[in-house]
Amino acid sequence: MQFSTISSNETLYAMALTRMNFYQPAAILELYRTLGSATAIFEHRHRVRDILPDASQRLVEQLAQMDQLLKRAEAEMEYDRAHGIQPLELNNPLYPQRLRECDDAPLVLFYKGCADLNARRVVSIVGTRRCTSYGQDLIRRFMTDLRQLCPEVLIVSGLAYGVDINAHRQALSQGYPTVGVLAHGLDDLYPPRHRQTADEMVKNGGLLSEYFTLTNADKMNFVRRNRIVAGMSDACILVESAAKGGGLITMRIARDYNRDTFAFPGAVGAMYSEGCNNLIRDNGAQLISSAHDFVEAMGWTDDVTLQEAHRQGIERQLFPNLSAEEQTVVRVLQQQNDQQANMLAVKTNLPIARLASLLFELEMKGIVRTMAGGIYHLLS
């Protein structure tokens, strides 16, 4: 981890201000940006109305008692040092600069990891916690193809169930750094079953939060963390969403921040594509169906690898190492996915015994998956 050279006092004062920031976020940020540092706020804490004449009485009283908040900040800093966590103040060069531009940026972020939060390209992937096979396939293919087109991208999500965890895991599988934005302190992890993935992310990416330790994962915290997911990115992609959901909140915030927003369409009437389809219909997001669509829309076509991908036809050669018979089975499933073996035998004109052997080989290669009812599902 690259540690900042910001003075420990500045960090301490910023952390103390964070303790009152939830009650006076706009005023604290205005004061911070006016005076230029948390240290300057501390020095002016007894005469805040000299800087902000309209400061509320509550803010004046809180700043006058700022010394009491320093004790909790000192305990937090001690914990952070012992556990490899770095507090990043708004003026810290390691703080996500895209997020810093936002009017409601957190005064302090707590970071554990090794990824550059100011990477050249940062993409957030969000969506439902009930990600379907369709959504999982979209994420897998998108991440695989994006890696060929743009090798250096930081992937951001919220480490929740569904779309989030699939995005993180597929990013790791492709060698992408990936950062999870949490709705609680870095002394805990919710949901606990994502611990192994979170540990891998610390080694190739990181965990990020605006919350002190001993902060529970309350419902409102998840809503607040969505602004970090949106604000620290160049673009936000919605994979699957019901008509209402947290992913749609993140997309709205991203639009408010003037970030590029994209959504994958789904079947009409599909519950977890309804939010995406509505967003596209209402011009709240651009429709994409592939990584190539996304890269072109973002204007990231200057990558040499993109031109190489065009030359070699990577987008079209999805299954270059399959036999002619295997290609036949795949083509049928591409035309209509999720079919039983007897229907595949009719459409491929292959004997059922031979088809069973081919389907087994395709499953071993990670091309198809057997689902309930003897249905075969094409993964890529």
Image: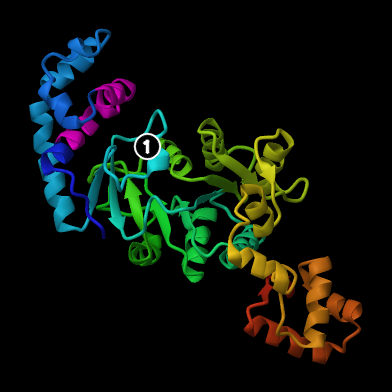
Q: Is residue 307 above or below residue 227?
A: below
Residue 373 visible in the shown view: no
Residue 212 in the image: x percent, y percent?
24, 42
What residue is rendered at 15% in x and 37% in y? Answer: 10
The quarter of the displayed image where residue 61 is located:
top left
Q: Is residue 80 left or right of residue 221?
A: left
Task: Give the labeled residue for mark 1.
Answer: 100
Q: Which amino acid type is marked by label 1?
A: Arg
The residue under the point 41% across, 34% down is 101
Q: Is residue 207 left or right of residue 270?
A: left
Which portion, as a residue range, is magenta?
A: 13-34
**In the figure, is residue 204 to the left or right of 163?**
left
What coloring was used for the rendering? rainbow
Between residues 319 and 222, which one lies in front from this camera angle? 319
Residue 308 visible in the current orientation: yes
Say which quadrant the C terminus sits in. bottom right
Mark 1: which secondary structure? helix
Quarter residue 197 falls in: bottom left
- Residue 27 part of the magenta-drawn span: yes
x and y percent of residue 229 in the render? Answer: 45, 44
Left or right: 64 in relation to 139: left
Q: Could you tell me which residue is drawn at 27 percent across and 8 percent down?
A: 54
Q: Predominant secondary structure in magenta?
A: helix
Vertical order, 113 against 5 (above or below):
below
Residue 251 image point, x, y percent: 56, 39
